[in-house]
Each structure stands twice: as structure tokens, then as C-alpha cells.
């Protein structure tokens, strides 16, 4: 079985976006230590899963080769196959991406059963909430930014009671702390 990881930026009070999708609370620039950590996290990954809304910005942004990113990161993001979770798209408008709809648990379990390396998701918000609520993630990597915003899009959906086991907590020079959790099974 492949490992399915979540990597998400969050505020200290648990939001992945502001009330209107704002991301201005994120800490930049990153330091070399967090970049090395993320490189190690993504090294075994050979599939990226995205929600449709995030894919609409994410895939074209990386295809345009954003400033401030290394060519190695740009190539990895563009060359890694993507699965876009959507019930409204029937085919992918993007290179190197396929669309998967229908039952989320069935789709994820099929992906996890395929041969290959790890799978990672960066969101978006609805997808993250659904994956957490359905217990489909094997690892949660929360990159906690030293900012509280008081309201917004929560990482954990209301009513999603889930016990987690802390694997590691790692502070970085830029002020972000990575919390690596795994679901606690009984």
C-alpha cells in the first residue's frame, strides 16, 4: 500500500486560509532548513492529488515557472503525475494530470493500491476536509505559521473527531514549525 500524505500550511489557530481565501498570513521567505525538510518529505512521492479549485491555480502557476523557486522544484512539480479530484470535470485540461470523480474513498483506495511511491496532497480546502473526515490520510504534515487569524477555512472539519499520534515536531529558522502526525489506530 502506498502512503498518502497531507502537506498543508496552517495558522497557529488551525486555518489553511482566511475567511475569503486569504493566504497573506503565510511566512516567507523560507529558510534552507525548511526547504531541505520538504525535499525529504517529497522525495518518495510520485503522485500529487489536488482538488479541482486548487488545481486551477496550482498547475498553471507551476507550468509558468514561478520566480523564487528552484528549477529542480519547478521540474518536480510539473513532471510529477497529478490526479485532480472533481465531479464536475470529465477530462483534464492540463498536461500530466487526470481527473477522478465519484466516491472519494474508492478513488483514494484505488490510488493507494497501485504500485508506486508515496502520494501527496496539498488541498484544497474541501478535499482536505473530506480526506480527514473519511480517515483516508496516512500522514498529516502541518506547517504551522506563527500567525493567528481568528477565522477562516479550518484544516479540520467540524465534527471530525480523530485521534492523532505526533511523530515529530520540527521548528525552522523562518518561524514555521512542522508537525508530523499519523492517525492513532485504536
Image (spheres, rainbow, N blue to C red):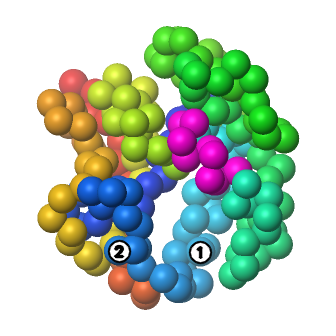
Q: Which residues are magenta?
A: 51-59
- Which marked residue is nearer to the observer: mark 2 or mark 1? 2
What is the quadrant of residue 120 in the picture?
A: top right
Q: Where residue 112 appears, x then y in whole percent?
A: 60, 24
Query: Is residue 16 depicted above or below 29 in this figure?
Result: above
Which residue is at a point 73% across and 72% down the rendered structure image? 66
Query: Is residue 112 depicted above or below 127 in this figure?
Result: above
Asked whether residue 117 appears in the rendered view, the answer is no
Left or right, 163 with reference to 52: left
Taking the magenta stretch, the answer to whether it contains residue 54 is yes
Q: Where residue 96 appears, x then y in whole percent?
A: 82, 39
Q: What residue would you read off at disc 1?
A: 35
Query: Helix, strand or loop at disc 2?
Result: loop
Asked whether residue 74 appears in the rendered view, the answer is yes
Which residue is at a point 43% across and 86% down the rendered structure image? 174
Which residue is at a point 58% across and 57% down the rendered structure image? 41
Which residue is at a point 47% across and 44% down the rendered structure image? 124
Query: Is residue 87 depicted above or below 2 in this figure?
Result: above
Q: CA distance from mark 2 to mark 1?
A: 19 Å
Label 1 crowd bin: few (<14), some (14–19), many (20+), radius 10 Å: few
What is the quadrant of residue 149 in the picture?
A: bottom left
Nearest the eye: 177 or 121:
121
Amino acid at each position: 500500500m502506498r502512503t498518502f500524505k497531507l502537506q498543508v500550511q496552517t495558522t497557529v489557530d488551525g486555518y489553511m486560509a482566511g475567511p475569503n481565501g486569504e493566504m497573506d498570513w503565510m511566512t516567507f521567505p523560507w529558510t534552507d532548513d525548511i526547504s531541505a525538510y520538504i525535499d525529504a518529505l517529497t522525495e518518495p512521492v510520485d503522485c500529487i492529488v489536488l482538488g479541482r479549485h486548487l488545481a486551477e491555480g496550482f498547475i498553471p502557476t507551476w507550468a509558468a515557472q514561478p520566480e523564487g523557486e528552484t528549477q529542480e522544484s519547478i521540474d518536480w512539480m510539473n513532471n510529477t503525475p497529478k490526479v485532480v479530484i472533481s465531479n464536475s470535470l470529465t477530462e483534464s485540461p492540463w498536461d500530466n494530470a487526470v481527473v477522478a470523480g465519484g466516491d472519494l474513498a474508492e478513488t483514494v483506495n484505488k490510488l493507494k493500491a497501485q504500485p508506486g511511491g508515496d502520494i501527496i496532497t496539498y488541498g484544497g480546502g474541501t478535499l482536505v476536509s473530506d480526506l480527514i473526515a473519511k480517515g483516508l490520510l496516512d500522514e498529516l504534515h502541518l506547517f504551522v505559521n506563527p500567525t493567528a487569524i481568528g477565522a477562516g477555512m479550518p484544516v479540520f472539519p467540524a465534527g471530525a473527531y480523530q485521534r492523532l499520534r505526533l511523530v515529530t515536531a520540527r521548528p525552522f529558522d523562518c518561524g514555521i514549525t512542522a508537525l508530523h502526525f499519523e492517525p492513532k489506530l485504536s
